[in-house]
Image (cartoon, rainbow, N blue to C red):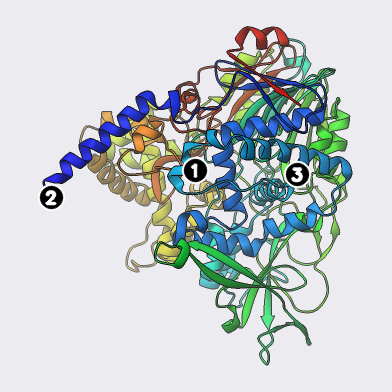
Amino acid sequence: MRKKWPIVLLIVVLFLAGVVFIGPSFLNRFQKDGSLRLAGLKAPVRVLRDEKGMASIYAKNLEDALMAQGFVTAQDRLFQMELTRLFSSGQISELAGHAGKKIDIRMRAIGFHRQAKKHARILSPETRIFFQKYADGVNAYIKGRAKTHHLEFKLAGIKPDPWTIEDSLTIMYYMGWDSAGNIDAEIISQMLVDTLGPDKAGEIFPVNVNPDDSALPVLQTVLGGTGVGLSCPATDASLRAFLERGPLQVGSNNWAAGPRISSGGKPIVANDPHLDSRILPGPWYPCGLILPDRRFVGVMIPGMPGMGVGCSSDFAISLTNAYGDAQDLFVETVDPSNPDRYMEGNESLPFTVIEETLKIKDKKAPGGFKEEKIKIRFTRRGPVVSGVLSSLKAKKVMTLRWTAFESMGPLVGIERLLHARTVEEIHEGLKNVNWIMLNFVFADTKGDIGWHVSSRLPIRMEGDGSLPFVVKDGRDNWSGWVPWDEMPHVTNPDKGWVGTCNHLVVKRDYPYYFSSEVSGSYRYERLKQLLDTPEKKSADDHWQYQLDTLNLMAMRIVPLMAKALLAHEDTREMGTILTEWDHRDDTDKVGPTIFQAVYKRFAWLVFKDELGRELAETMLDHWTYWQERLQKMVLEGASPWFDNIETADIKETRDGLFYQAALDAAGELEDRLGDDMKKWTWGKVHRMEFVSPIRREGIGKGLVGGGSHPFPGSVETLCRGMYDFNNPYGVTIPASLRMVADLSDEDKIMAVLPGGVSGRMFDPHTTDQIKAFVSGEKVYWWFSDKVITEHARHELVLTP
């Protein structure tokens, strides 16, 4: 029997190789040329596809354009849309089986789909049409073109359900979730307080810096009214699941340079949203919507209509995560005499309870699925998110409150942006984007530039959102919302540009609490260095800024680290390499490998003894929580945290820990890369691997994926190359798009995706932009009729 395995393996490999060779010709084909009928259109629509497979949709009216957008997106990305719908609505175990159960429980508890159904009922006629026409287009493809559905559906054993407005709204809320604040920081902070006590825990709470604030303040946590000294369920498995990153977690850089500092005389807008882009085809879908009086060329998350990032005839718009804290956890006390009720002071109130059914793929179950019911309980603040399956035994539970769920209205905002023409109108249109906390940066063809933080921020009566809030009585701790006109924003600043890099965007004189955890200041500081120079910048300059690998954190820490390593014979070579390194995280350099490996191990040595392995791993895997704090400790030179509490007879120092970390790192790198230190280049360990959602690992992964590639940058650089602290050094979150829109260029926009336009296995347009993305080459979205026509490779006419 064993002798047959090589033959079977050879047959599998030959089959896959044959599929790769001939697959695009028949296995995953759809119609790109000729004509087909689309019921619901008012007039014919032309769809021109260029050399990248990107569609430019020429329509006589916006409704037809949206319907065609839904149809074309489904042609290219229907399987991706179905996966996102299953994930965000808490149905992924229908595909993944029991492995998806924990995710489904979390998604059901939060309730994106539950909220979407409520929201769909109150949409304005304008907004309902906006979403419905898109859904009509998707459904026209699902129902009318079944023979051309993605091959992935057959391989996964599922079929697409009809698309609804609720599905688009569910994805909308799912997108907004990770932008809305610091639930993960609240959980980690509470775990630290439970382990260390409030005073000791406060020593390593996040440090947040706004480089535009001359005082460079440290935001102190307000502990009043929070879960200090309580035995809160922060280690509950259901709650800890919130610490896991979702695929649409948003980071990013964006900026707009005004006409005064732009070589073409009009603004330039740049954006590189940071999302997990390893699973092909990447999170963004690009296309052009071209109407008789205006046009839009940009990207949107598949499953949502309109344009999120891109350029219109009148403006360009971009986004980053603002990290404004719009979410809170509340510690609730279960009535000791009745587990069906909870306490608000002396008042006992009944939990609202709903029951939901999980449908879990199980080959052993009748019909191939096993059903499991879960109960989700609610207080007046929101759903119980701790102990979802076993909460009846808990004395205390945590509930979740999110401003997006309390800010529903007849508009969602993105539909109004399609009608904006000026910076002023964009400011106004964003007023209704209450479901996602983003820094929108934009510019118009008149020469104005602007920035505005979207969504709503609560005004808290007690505490600051850093820790779960203990419910003591029936008073609402959220006393209202920060007024829209007082949300952070600016128009035409004196310096001639505006930009954000997930850093703290408010100064210490801002009258409201904004957030207790944001990204480190390094990327924004570097952006300031690049944009504050006096010369005018071209679009090519801005493209290179997105690829910049200078690590400002390393510039500060390396001299201290190198000095410590040079003092010992067995780490002297490492110290020499660091001394000669230019602090750029380039793939052909050894310096970043040594720095990242030593500093990672150094952080572990600093925190592990006090926190223990599990809590240290949890905290350290959230870079934004500790990076600025640890840098401050390192630059100050001395800290009680440097002393290992497990070695009472020895007092460890910063430099001693650097030395020990270097020895540990050297052992790790030797095992991985060999004894020759000069060959420890960053690109050998810091790599990005592109995989198919159908085959993420094992035999055939390489044949259906996009391969593994050396990748520049790091967590701290503008060219983002984030990796998981506990699973170094493979890239997990890079740019998910690079875009530079020069409003003086009427023909094209610089833009590249980490994958391609298509989401079909074996389609060349699923992977054809990987090489350019990794190497930094320019790719273009075509904008004017002239160049769209010149680059057209296919033409499909959709007729009523």
- Residue on which disc 3 sits: 507
Tag 2 secondary structure: loop
Mark 2, other Cα within 10 Å: few <14 / some 14–19 / many ≥20: few
Q: CA distance from mark 2 to mark 1?
A: 33 Å
In the displayed structure, does residue 98 sit left or right of residue 593? right
Tag 1 secondary structure: helix
Mark 3, other Cα within 10 Å: few <14 / some 14–19 / many ≥20: some
Q: Nearer the viewer, mark 2 or mark 3?
A: 2
Up-down relation of residue 46 to residue 77 (above or below): above
Front residue of this view, candidates 255 and 765 = 765
Kind of residue indicated by mark 3? Lys
Front residue of this view, candidates 183 and 299 = 299
In the displayed structure, does residue 72 sit left or right of residue 412? left
Q: CA distance from mark 2 to mark 3?
A: 68 Å
The answer to whether any part of residue 754 appears in the image is yes
Mark 1 or 3, nearer chain start: 1
Q: Provide residue 104's location: percent of width, then percent of height.
A: 56, 60
Q: Quadrant of the C terminus?
A: top right
- Residue on which disc 2 sits: 2
- Residue on which disc 1 sits: 153
Up-down relation of residue 469 to residue 86 (above or below): below
